[in-house]
Amino acid sequence: MSMTSILWVGKSMAEKSFVLFILFFCLSIIGKAYSSDAYLKVENKIAPGQKYYSKKGYTVKASGKGRCMYGVYSRATCTVLYNKGACKVGIHYASVKNGCAVKDSWQDFEVINNDTGHVVGKLRWVKEMWSGPYLKLTDNPGAFMTYRTFFTAVSGVLNLWTGLS
């Protein structure tokens, strides 16, 4: 094999490697644009003796009503007891599918008192175009839930917060 042939083969392999790298890079960008992950966290700070205390805690679950949500969740529900840390619901939403790149994504959730089995509150996880996710507390009797915006939990309520994974 001549030196010219060896150089040609080396150049050809380098070009193929570069093309493959660009291809994989583009596919990863397309995959990220197609769908993204976020989370909803819940922390129970309602102590015994307070008005909304629940011995068995509260469960937060997706209600099935949403827009531009792709797939379901890494966990569709989470249950949190008083002062036992936070539980996390993973949210998988579409960025491009069905024109969702130009629409807001949202998902409704219900808060269930595990002592009674009744829905006691509702909230909506929202991801608007070009902004971070946030929560709307759509049914919050007695203000027993709060949208946690700082790093400290509020005492006497369910603390809810959201973010991107």
Image: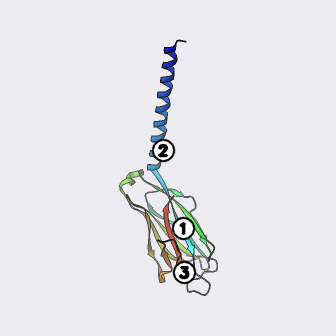
Mark nearer the viewer, 3 or 2 = 3
Three-letter amino acid code of the residue under disc 2: Ser
Q: Amino acid at mark 1?
A: Lys
- Residue that numbered label 3 is attached to: 155
Where in the figure is residue 77, as x and y percent of width and height?
Answer: 57, 66
Q: Which residue is mark 1?
A: 41
Mark 2 highlights which residue?
28
Residue at 51% over, 25% down: 13
The amino acid beneath tag 3 is Ser
* Separation of residues labelled 2 and 1 (CA atoms): 27 Å
Which quadrant is the N terminus positioned in?
A: top right
Between disc 3 and disc 1, whose residue precedes?
A: 1
* Residue 85: x %, y % from top left: 61, 71
N-term-proximal mark, 2 vs 1: 2
Label 2: which secondary element: helix
In the displayed orientation, state which residue is furthest to the left.
102
The outermost residue toward the front is: 3
Q: Are marks 3 and 2 in contact (CB under 8 Å)?
A: no
- Closer-to-camera residue (16/66): 16
Q: CA distance from mark 3 to mark 1?
A: 16 Å
Up-down relation of residue 157 to residue 10 (above or below): below
Q: Nearer the viewer, mark 3 or mark 1?
A: 3
